[in-house]
Amino acid sequence: MSLNLILAIIILGGWLFSRLFKIIKLPNILGMVIFGIIIGSTIGKLIPGTLWDIEPLLKSLALIVILLRAGLGLSKATLQKAGRTAVLMTFVPCLLEGGALTLLFYHFFVFDWYVAGLTAFMIAAVSPAVIVPSMLDLIEQGYGKKNEVPSIVLAGASADDVFAITLFSVFLGLAATAGVDIGRALISIPLSIAGGVISGIVAGWLLVKYFRRRHQHVRATEKTLVLIMVAVLLVQLGDKLHVAALLGVMTVGFILLERAEYIAHELAAKLKKVWIFAEIILFVLIGMSVDVPTALSAGLRGLMVIAIGLVFRSFGVFLSTLGSSLNLKERIFCIIAYLPKATVQAALGSVALQAGVAEGEIILALAVLSIIFTAPLGLIGIKVFGKRLLELDL
């Protein structure tokens, strides 16, 4: 099978399943993921290796597009209104879920502490790729605007991954006997976040200066291409310097909105069109990376542990929203919105196996099971309860 053919199948099939799921009142993203699972399960062996070579690039570009859209939709006033709640949402749910899962994997799967920790924090990461488009849809429709509920979830989810991935890396290093300094690694979390934000501020400021100066001479489509490529370079630089690059990408959008609002709206409109293509690619590829037999090998025990972890994550969200202006319905919505997992688990599920960790196979199975269980649960929950729990403010 040629690369051209498989890409045509991904795009057309993903689009058709997206439309089908909209007709039956289910999230269109879920349709794309399920189509990806079908492809992976039926013609997976016929897929050319070239696709898997460029898969990280395609996923990265799609994530960049959605995080730029998120940044372009977050104003300074919104963040000030979200305040303390948004900050707590970045780490409290992740730490509670990761801590609980570490204990559960240690006792129920008889992993040693390091392996239990890396598995726990790999699974604890939420998926911005699933959450961000859902929140943007609600923002555009005017739901939860009074207390900026979707914006709180947006801001929290993007940084949640920084904690989860950093702690995953710490435990992986310890499990592989790489002599990781735990104290230094933990200090790297705030440094990584600060580095990502600072790099985003610098890149955003430079873009603002250029776009303002050349506004009449550079078309909106060209501005969008420049923005995306700068974001790609930012991610590459962030990977080299070990800073939260994706958080930096979101910051670029935020700076553009604050310093050049008219240009930001112009870019947001273009990125919304680009997302139609990027969304299909991202979620079908996520579905294709799911190996159903591998997931089933984790069994009911794995499902039980993941479900208990979600209970602790939900409690973390509940604690984070205590004392806020959010009412009970809005707090329940935040809990539902923080359930989906997909992108990080698809990316990191096989890392432990490749690093030679003895339990790598079962870790991969748990990663796949977490996607199959939580992505539909969260997506359907947001779709069904979003408009029921959040007030429409136009």
Image: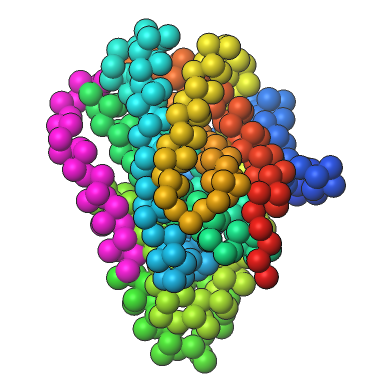
User: Eyeballing the image, is 155 above or below 77?
Assistant: above
Q: Quadrant of the N terminus?
A: top right
| 131 or 218, nearer to the observer | 131
Q: Which residue is drawn at 34% across and 65% down?
A: 200
Q: What stretch is highlighted in magenta?
A: 175-201
- Name the residue: 30% across, 38% down: 166
User: Where is residue 265 drawn, in percent x and y?
Assistant: 56, 77
Question: Would residue 158 be seen by someone viewing this image from the given angle?
Answer: no
Q: Residue 146 falls in which quadrant of the image? A: bottom right
Give residue 212's position: percent from left, percent from top: 43, 87
User: Residue 7: x, y in percent?
Assistant: 67, 46
> In this orientation, which residue lies closer to the viewer: 260 or 50?
260
Give the image quarter of residue 299: top right
Would residue 248 appear left or right of 31 to someone viewing this image? left
Q: In which quarter of the image is the C terminus?
A: bottom right
Question: How many marks can you see?
Answer: 0
State the residue at coordinates (47%, 25%).
Answer: 309
Magenta run includes residue 197: yes
Q: Nearer the viewer, residue 164 or 176?
A: 164
Is residue 195 covered in magenta?
yes
Residue 187 visible in rendering: yes
Q: Position of residue 16 (x, y in %)?
A: 80, 46
305 or 143, nearer to the observer: 143
> At 66% across and 40% down in the image, what residue appears?
381
Q: How is the image coloured?
A: rainbow
